[in-house]
Amino acid sequence: MNGIINLRKEAGMTSHDAVFKLRKILKTKKIGHGGTLDPDVVGVLPIAVGKATRLVEFMQEEGKVYEGEITLGCSTTTEDTSGDILERTPVTELLEEALIDEAMESMTGEIRQIPPMYSAVKVNGRKLYEYARAGQEVERPERQVTIYSFERTSPISYEDEKARFRFRVKCSKGTYVRTLSVDLGVKLGLASHMSQLTRISSAGMSLEDALTLDEIAERVAEEDFSFLQPLELGIGDLVKIDLTKEQAEDVRFGRFIDVNSNETQVAGFFQGKLLAILEKRDEEYRPRKVFL
């Protein structure tokens, strides 16, 4: 069984939970996911099955799109609604929407983030959330991410000395949208947190086409595996190169080939099918991963 699944992950489960359940549903062990989602976050979770697991790293590279809600007026220990209140800065008057929009625009491009303590990033062999649960604070490594767009998508609403609005962000892999929400509050001089998040696009898959675990289980029971999408969907942002018959034969035997490209890695296609991931060495390309 080989292919890619557009899973609609529901709230209350980790990405690992989703993979564990799919292994039981599909009765196969070779399954992996193309980008972690926090337990409270819902939305698109690309799942690789069989040979497609060799493409997970490329699926993760492609940009992602999220829609969610930011609450101004209080921050939390986890930077989302699951944590305890950390700080309050009551919103007692109307905020200028133009200032918020300007602040969001200023956060686009390449930026640096410090991962939240409640995250799966490892420091000295332990996950940050393990330190956090033990009440320990450790130095966290900065990471560089890219924010392609970050914009408010709703009017601001006010309640209980808090302000809320919807947003949409397109970002690179490794971005913590929770942290982006907190950093926006810092720019505005207000405590803040991410109060809701949905991933609507990842690895070229959209939320409107995603299936829940229950829907997948129903189809499997009916022996309908049409939800398995082809490997070709998993090449991420890799440039696609069409190979000649002679080149395809060389690739199958692990030989170097000459390809007109300046990319470090490319996806080699033959007769419309993904044949291999090719890696540049000197002036030629060698097969890095071959899909026979």
Image (tube, rainbow, N blue to C red):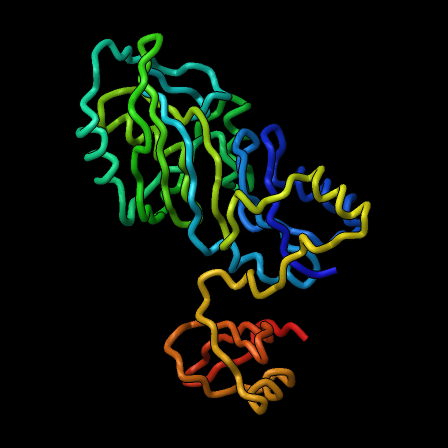
The correct choice, above or below, for 177 with respect to 292 in the image is: above
Q: Residue 75: x percent and y percent? A: 37, 19
Query: Which of these two is toward me, 252 or 225?
Result: 225
Quarter-wise, where is residue 263 in the image? Answer: bottom left
Looking at the image, can residue 200 be seen?
yes
Which one is nearer the viewer's eye here, 204 or 248? 204
Q: Depth check: 138 or 235 in front?
A: 235
Res. 123 visible in picture: no
Say above or below: 276 vs 183: below
- Residue lying furthest bottom: 246
Q: Left of 194 or right of it: where is 291? A: right
Labels in figure, total:
0
At horizontal 26% and vertical 27% (from top left) the residue drawn is: 186
Percent position (x, y) of residue 23? 75, 46
Residue at x 62%, y 74% (from the top left corner): 290
Q: Is residue 291 above or below residue 47?
A: below
Which corner quadrant of the image does residue 15 belong to? Answer: top right
> Going by the image, does 93 lie left or right of 201?
left
Q: Residue at x 76, y 42 (%)?
A: 218
Q: For the C terminus, which image quadrant?
A: bottom right
**Residue 53: percent from left, percent from top:** 64, 58
Q: Residue at x 32, y 20 (%)?
A: 72
Up the image or down, 264 lies above or below 214; here it is below
**Residue 146 drawn at (x, y percent):** 33, 49
Quadrant where the image shows the N terminus: bottom right
